[in-house]
Amino acid sequence: MSQNALEISGLRKTYRASGRSAAKEALKGVDLNIPRGSIFGLLGPNGAGKSTLINILAGLVTKSSGKVRIWGFDQDENPRQSRAAIGIMPQEPNLDPFFTPRGSLEVQAGLYGVPKAQRRTEEILELTGLTDKAEAYARSLSGGMRRRLLLGKALVHQPQILVLDEPTAGVDIELRNMLWENVRRLNEENGMTIILTTHYLEEAEAMCDEIAIINHGEVITRDTTANLLGRLDGKTMVIHPEREADIPDLPAGISAMRRNDGALVFTYRSSETAAESVLAAVRNAGISIRDVKTEEADLEDVFLSLTSSR
Ligand SMILES: Nc1ncnc2c1ncn2[C@@H]1O[C@H](COP(=O)(O)OP(=O)(O)O)[C@@H](O)[C@H]1O
Ligand SMILES: [Mg+2]
């Protein structure tokens, strides 16, 4: 059996045009394998296609083409088994305002066909810190409590894979820490595979063993967090051209973006590329340099250079 929790190949999604909005190609052929037992981060800016991917896994969005295997089960050929293997905490709260947390968890367990005797409603209320609010209507819960309940709902059928779509976007630090702690515990104690999407670098760094960066519907890089951080031997060179200039052709190992103020920003690894290579490429393009400075890069720069140059 495959050692991957998730195997995605050639995944595409085009949202159809409707009303005044044009058709949108949200996923452009994503290939991604995620190993069992990992905490995997899907990192990308808003609009990158993260939720589209997650919602396809959840069965909420129909893919245009491609293959998805969840815990070894093909999503189309074995819909029941593949759905049972995965629990999803969606980005958008989809709670029925007239259910209480206890009621919501019971209904969710029922939807997944979990027999009454095997339900873990009280345990999940405890885990998510909702025991005190177990009988409050969802509409009276604070935003943070709704998030907790969404996490709880994703766990009712004891899935092997837990997916969290932007779990901490807009939440306070206390809730963020509680979510991080829960997620780590589920991974360590239950061996649950965790997949989370985020547009916070900090979160991906703190939580994930491996990170895929997604932008404009494509996975543009995928590496262990340690390796991505290893790119911190990176440098940034900011060149202000004398006159407006486009990004020149560059040798491998240097990426570039053009800032709004017209400056060209180059990132490269100082262990592999000499500053002279950047300067040579700039001169070869006939760009005269008004000013130049270098800085140490951080992960933010790596991310920006990866996501803005395409
Ligand atoms: N239901 C939809 N109909 C049309 N376009 C959509 C729909 N959902 C998302 N999109 C578009 O698809 C792209 C990817 O969106 P999304 O998957 O939500 O990105 P992310 O979660 O990374 O912010 C965006 O351009 C978004 O506007
Ligand atoms: Mg999203």
Image (tube, rainbow, N blue to C red):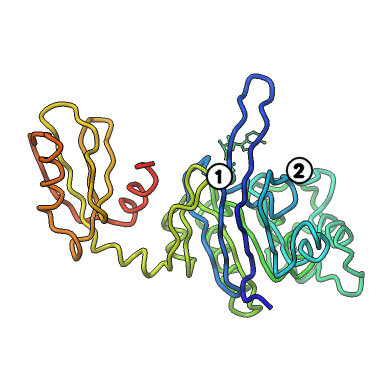
Mark 2 Cα-neighbour bin, 10 Å: few <14, some 14–19, many ≥20: some
Mark 1 Cα-neighbour bin, 10 Å: few <14, some 14–19, many ≥20: some
Name the side, left or right, on which 137 lies relative to 188.
right
Name the side, left or right, on which 59 lies relative to 257.
right
Q: Which residue is mark 1?
A: 28
Mark 2 is on which residue type?
Arg
Q: Residue at x 49, y 42 (%)?
A: 216
Q: Residue at x 48, y 70 (%)?
A: 209
Question: On the rendered image, what quadrant is the N terminus found in?
Answer: bottom right
Q: Residue at x 54, y 68 (%)?
A: 39
Query: How far across and how far down the image is residue 194, in percent?
Result: 60, 66
In the picture as drawn, the residue positioned furthest to the top comes out as 20
The residues bearing labels 1 and 2 have C-alpha atoms spaced at a distance of 38 Å
| Quadrant of picture, ligand 1 | top right
Mark 1 is on which residue type?
Lys
Q: Mark 2 falls on what kind of element? A: helix
Q: Residue 133 versus residue 107: which sits nearer the camera?
A: 107
Q: Which residue is mark 2?
A: 139
Name the side, left or right, on which 204 lies relative to 99.
left
Of the numbered discs 1 and 2, the one sitting upstream in the chain is: 1
Query: How far across and how far down the image is residue 285, in percent?
Result: 15, 37
